[in-house]
Image: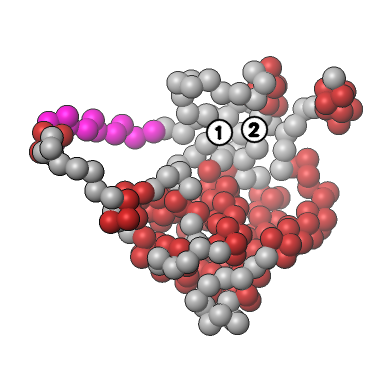
């Protein structure tokens, strides 16, 4: 098991692979007179934004978007959050962020506490839409989908290297409970889509927060007192 960062010490940055430069000569293959292809005819790969990894399997399969797809997207935000960061920021980093107004300058580099996603989940950003949809469908619509994630080498490694051991069980419970309500919602749709409402998801999150409220300080190294925050707000 990796030795986690001390709450008082800055987070160590993750080593980044060097990406090869794009060859400018490849641009010469496009005809100057060629008109841009309409968005309606472009594959989903060409229309991607930073939110693509969080799209529901229903939309990835090209079906009509509804409010339920937005709620499902937050499920993936929640899952990938734990892969994205090396635990909570240290006290010193939080104070530095406070002094900067919690604004990061453009060109200041990658934050040291962020982490790369495992290949399986990195593919959600640049893989084929149908395959990503199939992966998410299997995770969301099967009773053992959440357990397969929790017991996977990627998730175990993520917890061991980035999150304190006393938080492992609460995190696993959160992921399992989240996926469970989505899996249950697909019984009426025969797996064609999820139908979890915003209220249902928030209710589950509130229940989890109540159960693990005694660990709030473990999920954060926040050095600011509540009274200080109130004073700053009133100003």
Residue 74 at x, y percent in the picture: 59, 55
The answer to which image quadrant residue 24 occupies is top left
Q: Residue at x 22, y 33 (%)?
A: 22
Q: Label 2 vs label 1: CA separation?
A: 7 Å
The answer to which image quadrant residue 5 occupies is top right
Placement of 84 over or under 127, stated as above or below: above
Q: How many labels does the image show?
A: 2
Q: Earlier in the sequence, mark 2 or mark 1?
A: 2
Q: Residue at x 32, y 55 (%)?
A: 40
Residue placed most toward the observer, 222 or 53: 53
**Residue 113 can be seen in this image:** yes
SS of the residue at dot 1?
Answer: loop
Placement of 119 over or under 63, stated as above or below: above
Is residue 84 shown left or right of residue 33?
Answer: right
Is residue 140 shown left or right of residue 181?
Answer: left
SS of the residue at dot 2?
Answer: loop
The label number, if any, that marks residue 89 in the structure image: 2
Q: Which residue is drawn at 71% across and 50% down?
A: 166
Q: Indicate yes or no whether the magenta region holds residue 42.
A: no
The label number, if any, that marks residue 94 in the structure image: none
Placement of 143 over or under 88, stated as above or below: below
The label number, if any, that marks residue 113 in the structure image: 1
Provide the major secondary structure of the magenta segment: loop
For label 2, the crowd category at 10 Å Cα-Cα, with few meaning under 14, some 14 to 19 and many 20 or more, is many
Is residue 111 shown left or right of residue 92?
Answer: left
Q: Indicate yes or no whether the magenta region holds residue 25.
A: yes
Q: Are marks 2 and 1 in contact (CB under 8 Å)?
A: yes
Task: Please provide the residue range marked out in magenta.
Answer: 16-26
For label 1, the crowd category at 10 Å Cα-Cα, with few meaning under 14, some 14 to 19 and many 20 or more, is some
**Residue 201 can be seen in this image:** no
Residue 100 at x, y percent in the picture: 64, 18
Residue placed most toward the observer, 61 or 144: 61
């Amino acid at each position: 098991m990796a030795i986690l960062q001390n709450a008082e010490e800055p987070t160590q940055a993750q080593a980044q692979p060097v990406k090869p430069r794009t060859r400018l000569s490849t641009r010469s293959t496009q005809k100057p007179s060629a008109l841009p292809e309409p968005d309606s005819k472009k594959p989903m790969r060409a229309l991607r934004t930073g939110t693509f990894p969080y799209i529901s399997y229903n939309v990835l399969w090209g079906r009509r978007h509804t409010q339920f797809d937005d709620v499902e997207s937050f499920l993936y935000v929640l899952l990938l959050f734990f892969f994205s960061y090396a635990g909570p920021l240290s006290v010193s980093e939080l104070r530095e962020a406070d002094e900067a107004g919690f604004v990061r300058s453009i060109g200041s580099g990658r934050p040291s506490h962020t982490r790369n996603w495992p290949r399986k989940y990195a593919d959600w950003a640049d893989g084929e839409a149908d395959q990503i949809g199939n992966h998410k469908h299997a995770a969301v619509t099967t009773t053992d989908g959440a357990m397969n994630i929790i017991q996977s080498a990627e998730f175990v490694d993520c917890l061991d290297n980035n999150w304190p051991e006393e938080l492992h069980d609460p995190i696993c419970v959160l992921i399992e409970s989240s996926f469970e309500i989505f899996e249950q919602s697909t019984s009426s749709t025969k797996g064609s889509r999820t139908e979890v409402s915003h209220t249902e998801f928030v209710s589950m999150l509130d229940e989890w927060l109540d159960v693990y409220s005694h660990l709030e300080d473990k999920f954060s190294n926040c050095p600011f007192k509540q009274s200080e925050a109130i004073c700053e707000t009133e100003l």
